Amino acid sequence: MEEKSGVIVIHQMRLHRCDGCLAACRPDRRVARNKHIITRSNHLKRARRVPYTPLKENHVMANMPTLPTPPDTDAPPMPWFGMDIGGTLTKLVYFEPRETNRREIDKETEILKNIRRYLTRNSAYGKTGRRDVHLQMDNVTIRGRRGTLHFIRFPTSEVGSFLQLARSKGMATLLNTIYATGGGAYKFEEDFIKEVNMRLSKLDELDALITGVQFIDSMNPHECYYWEPNPDSATDNDSPPYLEPCLSQYVRKPFDFSSPYPFLLVNIGSGVSMLVVSSPYDYCRVSGTSLGGGTFLGLCCLLTGCSSFEEAIALAASGDNTTVDKLVRDIYGGDYERFGLRGDLVASSFGNMCSADRRAKVSREDLARATLVTITNNIGSIARLCASNQNIQRVVFCGNFLRVNPLSMKLLSYAMSYWSKGALKALFLEHEGYFGAVGCLLHYDSKNDKQNCTDSAQTDR
Ligand SMILES: Nc1ncnc2c1ncn2[C@@H]1O[C@H](COP(=O)(O)OP(=O)(O)O)[C@@H](O)[C@H]1O
Ligand SMILES: CC(C)(COP(=O)(O)O)[C@@H](O)C(=O)NCCC(=O)O
């Protein structure tokens, strides 16, 4: 750990970018492809910077007329997947090509057809797997192929069931390697080999995250957005920022993210990582906190007896944290004027729960709301400190904690703007928690398809 211009730097990592690792890489660059992939043993070392053409110049925006891109004839056979096995959720991104070329039609097996049909015709898989149909992206170009990205998630605790399903669908006969990231790519590596004879080619989760963010943003003009109080609504300046009268005034607006650098990327997954992204090819992790989405869900389950994230969010949406939290006015009887602390600000999260009387009266909804406000505000405070220490104005929040959670997004928007006196802007991304998996998909490499591996094994013999 070191201190740099007031910021505690815990793990400093530089984004590596090999010339060939991105989806739209040119065939003549592919020779250099795996040279710089960060492995487990070296991923904490600062990676060498390599020349790299920024994504925006390489990728075609979905809504713009494009010149036909010649298909990449060396590309691996379908199916193409990217996987992020996180602390709570596993994210799977599947690319479905729009057209199948003759070579593929000839080679397409019943197994591949069945897998395609199974993935794209369903939106639920077993009890817990879900396809986020609303996030589906049509007209995406990867390695010269046009197609659709499908976004699928399931709890990481169900990896075993996923492997059984993969085996029953015959996936291993088509693929022997999947690009994967997240802690689970290490933890479950052996299980993938044992259960389905599939190797995981592991990518660093923060590299994959940033690659995914840049790619999706370049493909989706509506990816980035922010929340702002509607100028037409009657402003209620007296309403505390964390209660409905204030929050209900916020409306969602698109943000033009075409010149984003530098920005702070705050990934709120089970835990939280904060990265300063200085250019398309340069980032470092400046901070993090263990109080993240996992903490919210864990505490909510303990305090309210709820059993899912959706239930916890629904409870929080109808609760009131002021019965649980001690406010400035509970301590001062009003504002703490000298330091500009309004009486309705939270002075001490859960501070009222020291009282047995108050505990006896508190509702599940109020406890859920206080948990959400506590976790969200803490992340907001750390993000704000990091951004101001680094002289950054744009703070981009992502991760599945923000899924179906406009309350936290509005709270973060309010906190960023209020505490920085309007200098900081909170931004959000539509594909919330899927960027790591997308980063993996973009790494898809012809070396790892079944055919090529078999060929090289034969050559070795
Ligand atoms: N269906 C869900 N089940 C569990 N947690 C969810 C769900 N949807 C959103 N979340 C929230 O998202 C967090 C996980 O976010 P994610 O970005 O997927 O991180 P990770 O990679 O650590 O799994 C959870 O801790 C929880 O707060
Ligand atoms: C270890 C992690 C990178 C794992 O990522 P996750 O599965 O939570 O998305 C993340 O949980 C994290 O950064 N935790 C905070 C550690 C800290 O800085 O205190």
Image: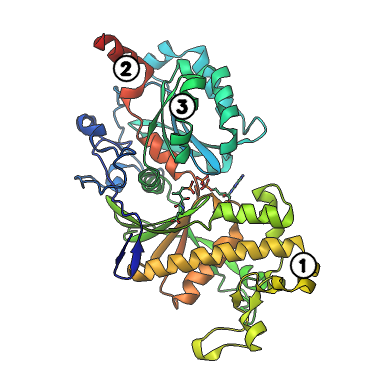
- Tell me which numbered mark, 1 or 3, is placed earlier along the sequence: 3
Inspect this view and state whether residue 425 appears.
no
Residue carrying label 1:
362
User: Residue 343 location, x and y as percent?
Assistant: 61, 84
- Placement of 11 over or under 17, stated as above or below: below
Residue farthest bottom in this picture: 338
| Gap between marks 2 and 1 measured at Cα | 62 Å
Q: Amino acid at mark 3?
A: Glu
Residue carrying label 2:
452
Q: Which one is nearer the viewer's eye here, 378 or 229?
A: 378
* Residue at the spot 80% in from the left edge and 69% down from the top edge: 361
Tell me: 98 left or right of 117: left
Could you classify mark 3 by the number of other residues whose Cα lies within 10 Å: few (under 14), some (14-19), or many (20 or more)? some
Task: Give the SS element for disc 2.
Answer: helix
- Placement of 98 over or under 257, stated as above or below: above
Q: Quadrant of the N terminus?
A: bottom left
Q: Which one is nearer the viewer's eye here, 195 or 215?
A: 195
Of marks 1 and 3, the one in the foreground: 3
Q: Which one is nearer the viewer's eye here, 166 or 123?
A: 166
Task: Give the SS element for disc 1.
Answer: loop
Residue carrying label 3:
190
* Residue at the spot 30% in from the left edge and 23% down from the top edge: 447
